[in-house]
Image (tube, helix red, strand yellow):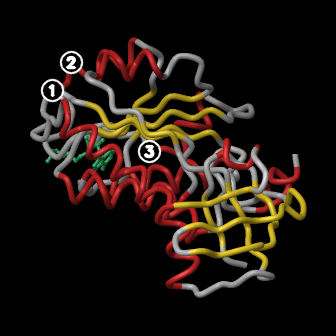
Amino acid sequence: MQRFFIPPDSLQRRPVTLRGAEARHLIHVLRLRSGDTVTLLDGGGKAYRAEILSCRKQTVTFRIIAPIPAGGESFLRITVAQAFLKVGKMDTSIRQLTELGVHRWLPFVSRRSVARPGGPRLATRRRRWHEIAMSAVKQCGRSRVPEITPLPSLEAVLAAATGSDLKIIFWEKEPVCFAPRVAQTAAGCCRRVFVLIGPEGGFEEGEVQSALECGFSGAGLGPRILRAETAAVTACALVQYVLGDMGPRAACAAEE
Ligand code: SAH
């Protein structure tokens, strides 16, 4: 069934009304009509089956039939803090990390970050990343759009990691790989996992030291140096595999 995002406050009013790009897509591209049923997503994890009542120009009204299980979300709450990269690479990262199921994405300025967007440019990029994440959510069957919060420094990232069950800084000079590191540090259940990835030029040693002092463990991704955007996706998939989100536990967790 076709899935559309609708602002949560529109779901409170009657009739439930959709406008803008999503409505235009429904009417003019997908050519749905009154009587058709669709899935409406509020972007925060709730989903509803709804019947189209009317389609006029750029406005669609619906009757909500019933809430439905949203699905597609990970039982892990993975945050990926990723040092700013060039524009195209950040776009790729947020799309791929959304498909994998990350809960939160924190692009940040690290000491060796070449790209350092700020002000209106950053606001424009943030809107663009949100749109990329929304379309990835629709495509991959998730129900929640990851939170995207740019941060000005590593210090702000370390503060945002407070309260996580497992905090890992991926560093190419770290000889211990991720899986044995988790076995050592977090034998129990972890849900809130915080992953830290550096920029194209890598972390400075002092940055790694600061993270370790804040309770992060270092982990390697094998004997090859990965590009930062490859490292982010690999780290996320590894965390999910090792902690059970890509195996049998994933199905059980979805029902919890
Ligand atoms: N400039 C560095 C590599 C940076 S790679 C160099 O050329 O030596 C960019 C980021 O990806 C790193 O900061 C790290 O977070 C991650 N990364 C890449 N390869 C890795 C590996 N083998 N192990 C752990 N992290 C890695």
Q: Position of residue 6 (x, y in %)?
A: 62, 55
In the visual, does 96 lie left or right of 92?
A: right
Please tell me which of labels 2 and 1 falls first in the chain: 1
Mark 2, mark 1: which one is toward the viewer?
1
Image height of 240 relative to 58, above or below: above
Q: Secondary structure at mark 2?
A: helix
Please tell me which of labels 1 and 3 falls first in the chain: 1
In the visual, does 26 lie left or right of 131?
A: right
**What residue is disc 1 on?**
111
Assess mark 3: CB under 8 A from ligand 1?
no
Q: Please name whichever residue, 1 or 216, is drawn nearer the observer in this view of the structure.
A: 1
Please tell me which of labels 2 and 3 falls first in the chain: 3
Q: Please name whichever residue, 26 or 60, is drawn nearer the observer in this view of the structure.
A: 60
Assess mark 1: CB under 8 A from ligand 1?
no
Q: CA distance from mark 1 to mark 3?
A: 24 Å
Query: Which quadrant, please, contains the N terminus?
Result: bottom right
In the visual, does 114 lie left or right of 198?
A: left
Residue for point 62% across, 66% down: 4
View extreme (top): residue: 213
Q: Are marks 2 and 1 in contact (CB under 8 Å)?
A: yes
View extreme (left): residue: 114
**What residue is disc 3 on?**
177
